[in-house]
Protein backbone atom coordinates (compact mmCIF):
# COMPACT_ATOMS: atom_id res chain seq x y z
CA UNK A 1 0.00 0.00 0.00
CA UNK A 2 2.94 2.30 0.66
CA UNK A 3 4.80 1.33 -2.52
CA UNK A 4 5.96 4.11 -4.83
CA UNK A 5 6.23 3.85 -8.59
CA UNK A 6 9.78 3.24 -9.73
CA UNK A 7 10.90 6.14 -11.93
CA UNK A 8 14.37 7.28 -13.06
CA UNK A 9 14.00 10.46 -10.98
CA UNK A 10 13.15 8.54 -7.80
CA UNK A 11 15.92 6.01 -8.36
CA UNK A 12 18.64 8.57 -9.07
CA UNK A 13 17.62 10.58 -6.01
CA UNK A 14 17.84 7.44 -3.87
CA UNK A 15 21.30 6.69 -5.24
CA UNK A 16 22.53 10.21 -4.39
CA UNK A 17 21.14 10.41 -0.86
CA UNK A 18 22.04 6.90 0.29
CA UNK A 19 24.87 6.59 2.83
CA UNK A 20 28.20 5.12 1.84
CA UNK A 21 27.84 1.35 2.44
CA UNK A 22 31.56 0.71 2.95
CA UNK A 23 32.48 3.67 5.17
CA UNK A 24 32.03 1.63 8.38
CA UNK A 25 32.10 -1.81 6.79
CA UNK A 26 32.86 -4.59 9.29
CA UNK A 27 33.17 -8.36 8.87
CA UNK A 28 29.84 -9.01 10.60
CA UNK A 29 28.07 -6.39 8.44
CA UNK A 30 29.48 -7.92 5.25
CA UNK A 31 28.59 -11.44 6.39
CA UNK A 32 24.94 -10.44 6.94
CA UNK A 33 24.78 -8.76 3.52
CA UNK A 34 26.22 -11.83 1.76
CA UNK A 35 23.83 -14.16 3.57
CA UNK A 36 20.91 -11.95 2.54
CA UNK A 37 22.16 -12.01 -1.07
CA UNK A 38 22.21 -15.81 -1.03
CA UNK A 39 18.68 -15.79 0.42
CA UNK A 40 17.46 -13.63 -2.47
CA UNK A 41 17.53 -10.17 -0.88
CA UNK A 42 20.10 -8.56 -3.14
CA UNK A 43 20.02 -4.87 -2.26
CA UNK A 44 22.44 -4.58 0.69
CA UNK A 45 25.19 -6.70 -0.86
CA UNK A 46 24.82 -5.10 -4.30
CA UNK A 47 25.28 -1.63 -2.82
CA UNK A 48 28.46 -2.84 -1.12
CA UNK A 49 29.68 -4.48 -4.33
CA UNK A 50 29.13 -1.27 -6.33
CA UNK A 51 31.04 0.87 -3.82
CA UNK A 52 33.98 -1.55 -3.67
CA UNK A 53 34.24 -1.79 -7.46
CA UNK A 54 34.33 2.00 -7.73
CA UNK A 55 36.84 2.63 -4.93
CA UNK A 56 39.29 -0.25 -4.75
CA UNK A 57 42.10 0.34 -7.23
CA UNK A 58 42.78 -3.33 -7.94
CA UNK A 59 39.18 -4.46 -8.33
CA UNK A 60 38.24 -1.41 -10.38
CA UNK A 61 41.00 -2.15 -12.89
CA UNK A 62 40.30 -5.89 -13.02
CA UNK A 63 36.58 -5.34 -13.56
CA UNK A 64 37.17 -2.86 -16.40
CA UNK A 65 39.72 -5.13 -18.09
CA UNK A 66 37.38 -8.12 -17.88
CA UNK A 67 34.51 -6.11 -19.38
CA UNK A 68 36.50 -4.38 -22.12
CA UNK A 69 38.24 -7.58 -23.23
CA UNK A 70 34.80 -8.85 -24.35
CA UNK A 71 33.12 -5.64 -25.49
CA UNK A 72 36.00 -4.96 -27.92
CA UNK A 73 35.53 -8.28 -29.77
CA UNK A 74 34.14 -8.26 -33.29
CA UNK A 75 30.68 -9.77 -33.77
CA UNK A 76 29.16 -11.75 -36.62
CA UNK A 77 25.89 -13.41 -37.62
CA UNK A 78 26.32 -17.11 -38.37
CA UNK A 79 24.03 -19.09 -40.68
CA UNK A 80 22.61 -22.28 -39.18
CA UNK A 81 21.62 -23.70 -42.56
CA UNK A 82 22.20 -22.93 -46.23
CA UNK A 83 18.86 -21.60 -47.44
CA UNK A 84 17.36 -18.33 -48.74
CA UNK A 85 15.27 -18.10 -45.56
CA UNK A 86 18.39 -18.33 -43.41
CA UNK A 87 20.02 -15.52 -45.42
CA UNK A 88 17.02 -13.30 -44.69
CA UNK A 89 17.27 -14.14 -40.99
CA UNK A 90 20.96 -13.27 -41.05
CA UNK A 91 20.27 -9.89 -42.68
CA UNK A 92 17.52 -9.08 -40.15
CA UNK A 93 19.75 -9.93 -37.16
CA UNK A 94 22.71 -8.00 -38.60
CA UNK A 95 20.54 -4.88 -39.04
CA UNK A 96 19.12 -5.24 -35.53
CA UNK A 97 22.45 -5.54 -33.71
CA UNK A 98 24.01 -2.76 -35.81
CA UNK A 99 21.24 -0.30 -34.91
CA UNK A 100 20.40 -1.13 -31.28
CA UNK A 101 20.70 1.45 -28.48
CA UNK A 102 21.87 0.83 -24.90
CA UNK A 103 21.33 3.15 -21.95
CA UNK A 104 21.21 3.19 -18.15
CA UNK A 105 18.10 3.59 -16.00
CA UNK A 106 19.99 5.52 -13.29
CA UNK A 107 22.41 7.57 -15.43
CA UNK A 108 20.83 9.17 -18.47
CA UNK A 109 24.24 10.37 -19.68
CA UNK A 110 25.25 6.76 -20.36
CA UNK A 111 24.25 5.67 -23.85
CA UNK A 112 25.77 3.73 -26.73
CA UNK A 113 25.39 0.78 -29.03
CA UNK A 114 26.29 -2.90 -29.07
CA UNK A 115 29.65 -2.47 -27.31
CA UNK A 116 28.06 -0.61 -24.41
CA UNK A 117 25.31 -3.23 -24.15
CA UNK A 118 27.90 -6.03 -23.94
CA UNK A 119 29.86 -4.06 -21.33
CA UNK A 120 26.69 -3.66 -19.25
CA UNK A 121 25.90 -7.36 -19.60
CA UNK A 122 29.40 -8.13 -18.34
CA UNK A 123 28.42 -6.59 -14.98
CA UNK A 124 27.06 -10.07 -14.27
CA UNK A 125 30.66 -11.29 -13.87
CA UNK A 126 30.87 -9.19 -10.71
CA UNK A 127 27.24 -9.07 -9.57
CA UNK A 128 26.01 -12.51 -10.80
CA UNK A 129 23.14 -10.85 -12.69
CA UNK A 130 22.67 -7.98 -15.13
CA UNK A 131 19.10 -6.95 -16.05
CA UNK A 132 17.92 -5.02 -19.12
CA UNK A 133 14.44 -3.93 -20.14
CA UNK A 134 13.89 -4.23 -23.89
CA UNK A 135 11.85 -1.90 -26.08
CA UNK A 136 11.22 -3.28 -29.59
CA UNK A 137 10.02 -1.02 -32.38
CA UNK A 138 9.17 -1.78 -36.02
CA UNK A 139 9.72 0.76 -38.79
CA UNK A 140 10.03 0.38 -42.57
CA UNK A 141 10.04 -3.39 -42.30
CA UNK A 142 12.93 -3.47 -39.79
CA UNK A 143 13.02 -4.16 -36.06
CA UNK A 144 15.12 -1.98 -33.78
CA UNK A 145 15.69 -2.33 -30.07
CA UNK A 146 16.51 -0.21 -27.04
CA UNK A 147 18.08 -1.87 -23.99
CA UNK A 148 17.85 -0.10 -20.64
CA UNK A 149 19.94 -1.48 -17.80
CA UNK A 150 18.24 -1.46 -14.38
CA UNK A 151 20.22 -1.48 -11.11
CA UNK A 152 20.29 -4.89 -9.46
CA UNK A 153 19.26 -3.50 -6.08
CA UNK A 154 15.77 -2.99 -7.56
CA UNK A 155 15.26 -6.77 -7.74
CA UNK A 156 14.85 -9.73 -5.39
CA UNK A 157 15.49 -13.43 -5.98
CA UNK A 158 13.70 -15.16 -3.10
CA UNK A 159 11.68 -17.38 -5.44
CA UNK A 160 14.66 -18.44 -7.54
CA UNK A 161 13.75 -16.02 -10.36
CA UNK A 162 14.44 -12.30 -10.38
CA UNK A 163 11.44 -10.14 -9.59
CA UNK A 164 11.29 -6.34 -9.68
CA UNK A 165 10.68 -4.28 -6.54
CA UNK A 166 8.53 -1.14 -6.46
CA UNK A 167 11.20 0.63 -4.41
CA UNK A 168 14.58 -0.16 -2.87
CA UNK A 169 14.40 -1.96 0.47
CA UNK A 170 10.96 -3.47 -0.16
CA UNK A 171 10.53 -6.56 2.03
CA UNK A 172 7.53 -8.03 0.21
CA UNK A 173 7.73 -10.04 -3.00
CA UNK A 174 8.43 -8.20 -6.23
CA UNK A 175 6.66 -8.31 -9.58
CA UNK A 176 7.42 -11.11 -12.03
CA UNK A 177 9.35 -10.14 -15.15
CA UNK A 178 7.77 -10.58 -18.56
CA UNK A 179 10.27 -12.66 -20.55
CA UNK A 180 9.34 -10.77 -23.72
CA UNK A 181 10.29 -7.43 -22.15
CA UNK A 182 13.36 -8.30 -20.08
CA UNK A 183 16.81 -9.78 -20.69
CA UNK A 184 18.68 -11.31 -17.74
CA UNK A 185 22.40 -12.12 -18.05
CA UNK A 186 23.85 -14.57 -15.51
CA UNK A 187 27.54 -15.15 -14.80
CA UNK A 188 30.10 -15.89 -12.06
CA UNK A 189 29.29 -13.29 -9.38
CA UNK A 190 32.92 -12.83 -8.35
CA UNK A 191 32.16 -10.02 -5.89
CA UNK A 192 30.94 -12.56 -3.35
CA UNK A 193 34.52 -13.76 -2.83
CA UNK A 194 36.16 -10.45 -3.78
CA UNK A 195 34.25 -8.44 -1.16
CA UNK A 196 35.57 -10.76 1.56
CA UNK A 197 39.11 -10.29 0.24
CA UNK A 198 38.56 -6.52 0.14
CA UNK A 199 37.34 -6.55 3.74
CA UNK A 200 40.43 -8.34 5.05
CA UNK A 201 42.74 -6.25 2.86
CA UNK A 202 41.44 -3.02 4.35
CA UNK A 203 42.20 -4.10 7.92
CA UNK A 204 46.00 -4.50 7.49
CA UNK A 205 46.05 -1.53 5.10
CA UNK A 206 44.61 0.73 7.81
CA UNK A 207 47.06 -0.70 10.37
CA UNK A 208 49.93 -0.05 7.94
CA UNK A 209 48.85 3.57 7.47
CA UNK A 210 48.63 4.05 11.24
CA UNK A 211 52.10 2.54 11.64
CA UNK A 212 53.54 4.88 9.00
CA UNK A 213 51.87 7.87 10.64
CA UNK A 214 53.24 7.03 14.07
CA UNK A 215 56.70 5.82 13.11
CA UNK A 216 57.42 7.58 9.85
CA UNK A 217 58.84 10.73 11.53
CA UNK A 218 61.09 10.76 14.59
CA UNK A 219 60.14 12.67 17.73
CA UNK A 220 61.96 15.85 18.78
CA UNK A 221 63.35 16.35 22.31
CA UNK A 222 64.87 19.66 23.43
CA UNK A 223 66.66 20.51 26.72
CA UNK A 224 67.00 24.04 28.09
CA UNK A 225 68.24 25.79 31.26
CA UNK A 226 65.29 28.19 31.08
CA UNK A 227 62.64 28.05 33.82
CA UNK A 228 59.22 26.82 32.63
CA UNK A 229 56.94 29.73 31.76
CA UNK A 230 59.67 32.19 30.84
CA UNK A 231 60.23 33.70 27.38
CA UNK A 232 63.26 31.48 26.84
CA UNK A 233 61.18 28.40 27.70
CA UNK A 234 58.44 29.45 25.26
CA UNK A 235 61.02 30.06 22.52
CA UNK A 236 62.30 26.51 22.94
CA UNK A 237 58.71 25.17 22.75
CA UNK A 238 58.07 27.12 19.55
CA UNK A 239 61.33 25.86 18.05
CA UNK A 240 60.49 22.16 18.47
CA UNK A 241 56.92 22.75 17.27
CA UNK A 242 58.22 24.30 14.04
CA UNK A 243 59.89 21.01 13.11
CA UNK A 244 56.44 19.60 12.38
CA UNK A 245 56.95 16.36 14.31
CA UNK A 246 53.90 14.76 15.89
CA UNK A 247 55.85 13.88 19.04
CA UNK A 248 57.96 16.63 20.62
CA UNK A 249 58.93 17.64 24.12
CA UNK A 250 60.83 20.41 25.95
CA UNK A 251 62.65 19.41 29.15
CA UNK A 252 64.42 21.39 31.83
CA UNK A 253 67.85 20.38 33.05
CA UNK A 254 67.77 17.23 35.14
CA UNK A 255 64.64 15.87 33.45
CA UNK A 256 64.75 13.02 30.98
CA UNK A 257 62.30 10.87 28.99
CA UNK A 258 62.90 7.29 27.94
CA UNK A 259 61.46 6.49 24.52
CA UNK A 260 59.34 3.37 24.04
CA UNK A 261 60.21 2.03 20.61
CA UNK A 262 57.19 0.28 19.11
CA UNK A 263 58.56 0.08 15.55
CA UNK A 264 59.21 -3.30 13.96
CA UNK A 265 62.85 -4.28 13.63
CA UNK A 266 62.30 -6.76 10.81
CA UNK A 267 60.00 -6.74 7.81
CA UNK A 268 56.47 -5.47 8.36
CA UNK A 269 53.72 -8.10 7.89
CA UNK A 270 51.24 -5.70 6.26
CA UNK A 271 52.74 -5.36 2.73
CA UNK A 272 53.06 -9.13 2.22
CA UNK A 273 49.45 -9.76 3.29
CA UNK A 274 48.07 -6.97 1.12
CA UNK A 275 50.10 -8.15 -1.90
CA UNK A 276 48.91 -11.72 -1.32
CA UNK A 277 45.26 -10.61 -1.45
CA UNK A 278 45.82 -8.44 -4.54
CA UNK A 279 47.47 -11.33 -6.37
CA UNK A 280 44.62 -13.64 -5.40
CA UNK A 281 42.13 -11.13 -6.84
CA UNK A 282 44.12 -10.91 -10.07
CA UNK A 283 44.14 -14.68 -10.40
CA UNK A 284 40.41 -14.89 -9.65
CA UNK A 285 39.36 -12.24 -12.17
CA UNK A 286 41.88 -12.55 -15.00
CA UNK A 287 43.83 -15.77 -14.66
CA UNK A 288 47.34 -16.35 -13.31
CA UNK A 289 49.97 -15.37 -15.90
CA UNK A 290 48.00 -12.79 -17.86
CA UNK A 291 47.18 -10.70 -14.80
CA UNK A 292 50.37 -11.17 -12.79
CA UNK A 293 51.25 -7.88 -11.17
CA UNK A 294 54.59 -6.38 -12.05
CA UNK A 295 57.34 -6.85 -9.49
CA UNK A 296 60.95 -5.86 -9.18
CA UNK A 297 62.09 -8.95 -11.09
CA UNK A 298 59.10 -9.31 -13.44
CA UNK A 299 59.09 -7.91 -16.95
CA UNK A 300 55.55 -8.85 -17.91
CA UNK A 301 53.26 -11.69 -18.86
CA UNK A 302 54.89 -14.79 -20.29
CA UNK A 303 54.05 -16.58 -23.50
CA UNK A 304 51.77 -18.82 -21.42
CA UNK A 305 49.17 -16.01 -21.31
CA UNK A 306 47.25 -18.00 -23.95
CA UNK A 307 46.23 -20.42 -21.19
CA UNK A 308 44.24 -17.58 -19.59
CA UNK A 309 42.14 -17.08 -22.70
CA UNK A 310 39.77 -19.72 -21.34
CA UNK A 311 38.15 -16.96 -19.27
CA UNK A 312 37.71 -14.73 -22.31
CA UNK A 313 36.28 -17.59 -24.37
CA UNK A 314 33.77 -18.43 -21.64
CA UNK A 315 32.64 -14.81 -21.29
CA UNK A 316 32.21 -14.44 -25.05
CA UNK A 317 30.22 -17.67 -25.24
CA UNK A 318 28.00 -16.56 -22.34
CA UNK A 319 27.17 -13.24 -24.01
CA UNK A 320 26.51 -14.93 -27.36
CA UNK A 321 24.26 -17.58 -25.83
CA UNK A 322 22.31 -14.97 -23.87
CA UNK A 323 21.58 -13.12 -27.11
CA UNK A 324 20.70 -16.39 -28.87
CA UNK A 325 18.23 -17.49 -26.19
CA UNK A 326 16.61 -14.19 -25.34
CA UNK A 327 16.95 -11.85 -28.35
CA UNK A 328 17.47 -13.67 -31.67
CA UNK A 329 14.19 -15.59 -31.52
CA UNK A 330 12.21 -12.45 -30.59
CA UNK A 331 13.62 -10.45 -33.51
CA UNK A 332 12.95 -13.24 -36.01
CA UNK A 333 9.45 -13.76 -34.64
CA UNK A 334 8.60 -10.05 -34.94
CA UNK A 335 9.91 -9.80 -38.50
CA UNK A 336 8.98 -13.15 -40.06
CA UNK A 337 6.71 -14.92 -37.57
CA UNK A 338 9.14 -17.87 -37.43
CA UNK A 339 9.64 -19.55 -34.08
CA UNK A 340 13.16 -20.85 -34.76
CA UNK A 341 15.94 -18.53 -36.02
CA UNK A 342 18.03 -19.89 -38.89
CA UNK A 343 20.96 -17.62 -37.97
CA UNK A 344 22.49 -16.52 -34.70
CA UNK A 345 24.70 -13.83 -33.12
CA UNK A 346 28.27 -14.72 -32.15
CA UNK A 347 31.29 -12.89 -30.77
CA UNK A 348 34.37 -13.77 -32.80
CA UNK A 349 37.47 -14.68 -30.80
CA UNK A 350 41.04 -14.48 -32.09
CA UNK A 351 42.64 -17.77 -33.08
CA UNK A 352 44.74 -18.26 -29.95
CA UNK A 353 45.95 -21.74 -30.87
CA UNK A 354 47.37 -20.57 -34.19
CA UNK A 355 49.14 -17.67 -32.48
CA UNK A 356 50.61 -20.01 -29.86
CA UNK A 357 52.09 -22.29 -32.50
CA UNK A 358 53.50 -19.29 -34.38
CA UNK A 359 55.24 -18.04 -31.26
CA UNK A 360 56.72 -21.46 -30.57
CA UNK A 361 58.15 -21.53 -34.10
CA UNK A 362 59.58 -18.02 -33.70
CA UNK A 363 61.22 -19.02 -30.39
CA UNK A 364 62.90 -21.99 -32.05
CA UNK A 365 64.15 -19.86 -34.93
CA UNK A 366 65.62 -17.32 -32.50
CA UNK A 367 67.48 -20.12 -30.69
CA UNK A 368 68.98 -21.09 -34.06
CA UNK A 369 70.33 -17.55 -34.43
CA UNK A 370 67.73 -16.07 -36.78
CA UNK A 371 66.55 -12.58 -35.86
CA UNK A 372 62.91 -11.83 -36.80
CA UNK A 373 61.78 -8.40 -37.96
CA UNK A 374 60.37 -6.60 -34.90
CA UNK A 375 57.98 -4.40 -36.89
CA UNK A 376 56.53 -7.38 -38.78
CA UNK A 377 56.02 -9.32 -35.55
CA UNK A 378 54.37 -6.32 -33.87
CA UNK A 379 51.90 -5.99 -36.74
CA UNK A 380 51.19 -9.72 -36.81
CA UNK A 381 50.34 -9.95 -33.11
CA UNK A 382 48.95 -6.40 -32.69
CA UNK A 383 51.70 -5.58 -30.20
CA UNK A 384 52.58 -1.87 -29.70
CA UNK A 385 56.13 -0.70 -30.30
CA UNK A 386 57.60 2.45 -28.82
CA UNK A 387 58.26 5.32 -31.23
CA UNK A 388 62.03 4.87 -31.32
CA UNK A 389 61.81 1.18 -32.26
CA UNK A 390 59.13 1.85 -34.87
CA UNK A 391 61.11 4.71 -36.49
CA UNK A 392 64.32 2.64 -36.57
CA UNK A 393 62.52 -0.25 -38.27
CA UNK A 394 60.93 2.02 -40.84
CA UNK A 395 64.32 3.53 -41.71
Image: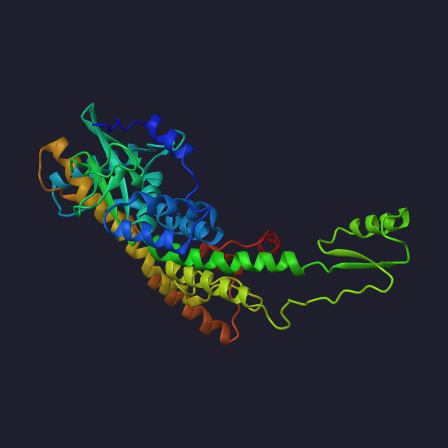
Determine which quarter of the picture holds residue 279. bottom left
| The one of 332 and 291 positioned closer to us in this rendering | 291
**Residue at position x 30%, y 27% in the image:** 7
- Looking at the image, residue 77 sits to the left or right of residue 29; the answer is left
Relative to 327, say whether 361 is above or below: below
Residue 248 visible from this viewpoint? yes
Residue that lies at the very extreme toward the top in this rendered image: 140
**Residue at position x 79%, y 52% in the image:** 243
Which quarter shows the C terminus? Answer: bottom right
Relative to 314, say whether 231 is above or below: above
Where in the figure is residue 305, as x and y percent of width and height? Answer: 41, 64
**Residue at position x 49%, y 51% in the image:** 57
Where in the figure is residue 284, as x and y percent of width and height? Answer: 37, 60
| The one of 94 and 170 positioned closer to us in this rendering | 170
Where in the figure is residue 91, as x and y percent of width and height? Answer: 21, 36
- Looking at the image, residue 40 sits to the left or right of residue 272; the answer is left
| The one of 24 and 360 positioned closer to us in this rendering | 24
Amino acid sequence: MNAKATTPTLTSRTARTRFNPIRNLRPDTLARALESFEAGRLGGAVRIFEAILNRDDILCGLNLKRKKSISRLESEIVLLENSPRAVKHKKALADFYASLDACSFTDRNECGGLRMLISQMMDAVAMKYSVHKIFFTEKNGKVSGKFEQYPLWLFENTSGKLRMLDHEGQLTDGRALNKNEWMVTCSDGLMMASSIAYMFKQLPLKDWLIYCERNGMPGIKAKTDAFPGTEQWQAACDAVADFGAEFHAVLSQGTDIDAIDISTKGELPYPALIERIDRMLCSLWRGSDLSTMSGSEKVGASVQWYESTLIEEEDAANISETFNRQIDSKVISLMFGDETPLAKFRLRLPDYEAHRYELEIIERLVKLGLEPDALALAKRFAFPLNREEASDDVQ
